Amino acid sequence: MESITYSNFRKDLTTYIKKVNDEASGPIIVTSDNAEDAIVVMSKRDYDSMQETMRVLSNSYLMKKVRKGDEQFESLNFKTHELIEID
């Protein structure tokens, strides 16, 4: 993860916004003199993905289904089928 100073981030704000959105470079840490004031800048797409992952991980019902699917796959206890296309 790239790390830059606040002053450089502010000076080239447009460049860094494009970078996190267009280049799939991941989040950028923006630092300041006080380490506790550091922030992370990420694309909305990455943020939404992270939030959805947290929702799934915190849902015990969904995680039970995921673990069951993993067990079935590992034990080769599954069936494959063609996808149905609806016009």
Image (spheres, rainbow, N blue to C red):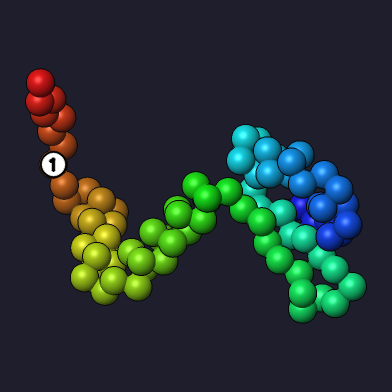
| Left or right relative to 53: residue 67 | left
Give the residue displayed 87% in from the left and 52% down from the top.
8
Does 41 sit left or right of 38 as displayed? left
Task: Report whether residue 75 is seen.
Answer: no
Q: Eyeballing the image, is 47 above or below 78?
A: below
Q: Secondary structure at mark 1?
A: loop
Residue 23 quadrant:
top right
**Nearer to us in this view, 51 or 68:** 51
Residue in the picture at 13% in, 41% down? 79
Image coords of residue 61 (percent x, y): 21, 70
46 is higher (above) or lower (below) than 15 = below
Q: Report the front residue among 31 and 54.
A: 31
Q: How many marks?
A: 1
Question: Residue drawn 89% across and 73% down?
Answer: 33
> Callout 1: few (<14), some (14-19), or many (20+) C-alpha neighbours within 10 Å?
few
Above or below: residue 47 compared with residue 87: below
The N terminus, quarter of image: bottom right
Asked whether 37 or 54 is in front, the reply is 37
Give the position of the C terminus as an image quadrant. Answer: top left
Which amino acid is tagged 1?
Lys
The reply to whether residue 61 is in sight is yes
In the image: residue 85, left or right of residue 5:
left
Identify residue for label 1. Answer: 79
Residue pictured at 16% horizontal, 37% vertical: 80
Q: Position of residue 12 (x, y in %)?
A: 82, 44
Q: Is residue 52 above or below residue 24?
A: below
Q: Is residue 57 left or right of residue 7?
A: left
- What x and y, as percent, mark residue 69? 23, 56
